[in-house]
Image: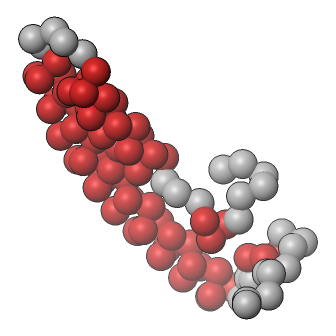
């Protein structure tokens, strides 16, 4: 996680990898003229969907665990990082 990203907006690495594989598969299908593009393209799309789903599930499970621990110890994420939440408009 980079320093300028908010804790609330962080996306899991598995979901990022899944999105990259999905995009790679679509680009293979659209821009290549070789016969193997179908196999490679659909393999990337399928593995991207699976990887994204696994990454998202792992992220949600870990986020719930961290939230539970923070609630048990009374830790406020933003105040412990020295930042405040921007006002809602």
State whether residue 7 is above or below residue 21: below
Q: Quadrant of the C terminus?
A: bottom right
**Residue 14 visible to the viewer:** no
Q: How is the image coloured?
A: secondary structure
Corner quadrant of residue 42 = top left
Query: Where is 43 relative to 7, above or below?
Result: above
Look at 22% across and 38% down and name the residue there: 45
Q: Is residue 30 left or right of residue 52?
A: left
Name the residue rendered at 78%, 52% in the picture: 3
The image shows residue 74, relative to residue 41, as above or below, that is below
Left/right placement of residue 73 relative to residue 41 reads: right
Camera-side residue of 84 and 66? 84
- Residue 44 in the image, given as x and y percentages of width and height: 24, 31
Horizontally, residue 6 falls left or right of residue 8, namely right
Which x, y percent locates residue 26? 27, 34
Relative vertical location of residue 56 with respect to residue 29 in this rendering, above or below? below
Quarter of image, res 87 = bottom right
Residue at (85, 79) in percent of width and height:
84
Most extreme residue toward the right is: 82
Mark yes or no: residue 28 visible: yes
Left or right of 4 in this view: 34 = left
At x 11%, y 23%, the residue is: 38
Please state the horizontal and vertical placement of residue 17, each as a whole percent of the image.
41, 40
* Number of numbered markers: 0
């Amino acid at each position: 996680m980079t320093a300028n990203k908010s804790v609330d907006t962080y996306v899991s690495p598995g979901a990022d990898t899944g999105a990259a594989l999905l995009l790679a598969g679509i680009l293979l299908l659209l821009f290549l003229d070789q016969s193997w593009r179908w196999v490679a393209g659909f393999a990337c799309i399928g593995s991207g969907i699976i990887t994204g789903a696994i990454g998202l599930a792992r992220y949600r499970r870990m986020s719930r665990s961290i939230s539970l621990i923070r609630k048990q110890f009374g830790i406020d994420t933003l105040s412990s990082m020295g930042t405040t939440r921007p006002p809602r408009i």
